[in-house]
Amino acid sequence: MSQVPQLGPLEPPAKKKLLDGITSWQKALAVLPLALLFIGGAIGGAVGAAGMVANVKIAKSALPNAVKAVAMLGVTVAAAVVFFVCAGLVNNALNG
């Protein structure tokens, strides 16, 4: 007769936070695209969140710090450009 294995209490898996493992200046540059949320509402928030995720991936990469900083600022500028293009398209579509 086989025995049922005894299991102890199950612990929930540890949640990894997005900004864990990066320095404070990298965190500041990573969340910078989220400023678009205050300018553009839902569109700005969506574009800003995508920019933040891209910045976190850059911050966790093996690039030199100077290259990381320039790349993260470039992502922020690109997110702003994408936001203004999307906002212009929505404005033209609504106002004809």
Image (cartoon, rainbow, N blue to C red):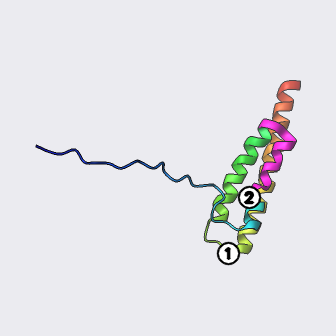
Q: Residue at point 71% right, 73% down?
A: 65
Q: Nearer the viewer, mark 2 or mark 1?
A: 2
Report which residue position mark 2 lands on. 30
Mark sitting on residue 32: none
Based on the picture, tell me whether residue 38 belongs to the magenta stretch: yes
Q: Is residue 1 left or right of residue 53?
A: left
Q: Which residue is mark 1?
A: 64
For the N terminus, the image quarter is: top left
Magenta residue span = 30-42
Dot 2 lies on which element? helix
- 74 or 40: nearer the eye? 40
Q: Is residue 8 left or right of residue 19?
A: left
Above or below: residue 13 compared with residue 45: below
Residue occupying the point 62% across, 55% down: 17
Marks 2 and 1 sit apart, C-alpha to C-alpha, by 16 Å
Q: Amino acid at mark 2?
A: Ala
